[in-house]
Amino acid sequence: MRHRTAWQALAENPLRVLRSAWPWRSLAYLVTGVAFGGTTVVVLPALLAIGVASLPVGVGAVFVLAVALSGVPVARFERWRLRLADRDPVPDPHRPPERPGARGWLRTRLREPATWRELGFTAVSMTALWWMDLLVLAFGLVVPFLLITAPLDDPSAWPWLVVGLCLLPAGPYTVTAWAAARGAVTRLLLAPRDGELGYRLTEVHASRARLVDAFDAERRRIERDLHDGAQQRLVSLNVALGLARLDAGPGSTLDQRIADAQEQLTLAVSELRELSRGVHPKALTDHGLAAAVENLAARSVLPVEVDIRLPRRLPTPVETTAYFVVAEALANTTKHSQATRAGVQAHLHAGMLTVSVRDNGVGGADPTTGTGLVGLADRAAAADGRLRVSSPPGGPTLLHLELPCH
């Protein structure tokens, strides 16, 4: 069942609908709607009557408040039930409580427009929607069944049998069409409004930024542990081997073995230093973006011209994002561009850091080919920035990054 809604199934091929699950899903949607609507028609007016009658003794306010908030559970159940007629879930429009506990939850819900919109939906459902569900089920299924069985009680009523048999094939279409329309109305009334979606998008963006910040903090911790822990131990071991070599006879087998061990240890320290720079460069933490990119350019196999003039240190997330974008861009240049030179420029203007990385390579950089550009764009977006790439076939390639410095 590849269709997302009953509407799509009806619109694409009405004849195939009868062989799909949509009529049965639609039937379940309307039957549960009648059952749930009938229950709310009995329960909510009874609670309201009890609340109004008991207001003089004080406890009535609890029942009235329960009726006022009844739209919240009703709408939650309706959003869950809607999956029968519309497989795309409807997002919950409610915000998390501002404070913990029942009082915080109550305060937040009473202040939300979504709560009162859901109460209005509950009223519409009680007074109209579930009654219409019942009528559609009656005319689509019950009436044809009664007409077909009419000759069992009165043989002279056989013409009604013909009418019932003619109406019976239309039943699944009637049920499916109304379930689709009912689902569309429900989605329209219960879906989050622009302001509520904006709040959720803000929360998602903030959550993503927090994850990036936590990841960068962890990278800095690993770099410190490598530099202050493992790297220092290896350096101390190299010194100890040097002292041990003094006690060995010059040119002896032991002296040669210690020299070989020192050589391997020196290589290990160099590799560990490169690894710690890749995790999080110490120059970035201590001296800022300009110094870190200068060190990066000095280690590059390509000649890289660096022009970074910043009036001050930038926020840590901005510096980290800019550095790793430059590092990945230069790595891509070395691996894929066949360039003979590259350049990095950065400047700060009106609270916006602009970074440009260019090369004279063959161009043709495509984010879909796994060159890391998608990851760079995601990282820039997490910092509320924007990444643009110009790389026509034949070159040159220009990567342009903009990061706000809040």
Image (spheres, rainbow, N blue to C red):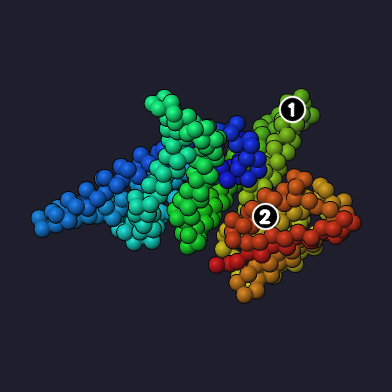
From the image, state whether disc 2 or disc 1 is nearer to you: 2
Q: Which mark is residue 244?
A: none
> Whole-percent x and y of residue 94?
41, 54
> Whole-percent x and y of residue 246?
69, 34
What residue appears at the point 47 percent right and 39 percent down from the top-left corner?
140
What residue appears at the point 55 percent right and 35 percent down from the top-left corner?
166
> Whole-percent x and y of residue 41?
29, 47
Tell which of 341 and 85 is nearer to you. 85
Q: Residue furthest left?
A: 57
Q: Say what secondary structure mark 2 lies in.
A: helix
What residue appears at the point 48 percent right and 55 percent down from the top-left corner?
188
As measured in the structure, the alpha-carbon distance from the residue carrying label 2 to the one carrying label 1 is 50 Å
Q: Which mark is residue 257?
A: 1
Tell which of 48 and 255 is nearer to you. 48
Amino acid type at image mark 2: Ala
Amino acid type at image mark 1: Arg
Q: Which residue is mark 2?
A: 377
Report whether 50 appears left or right of 278: left
Report whether 148 appears left or right of 406: left
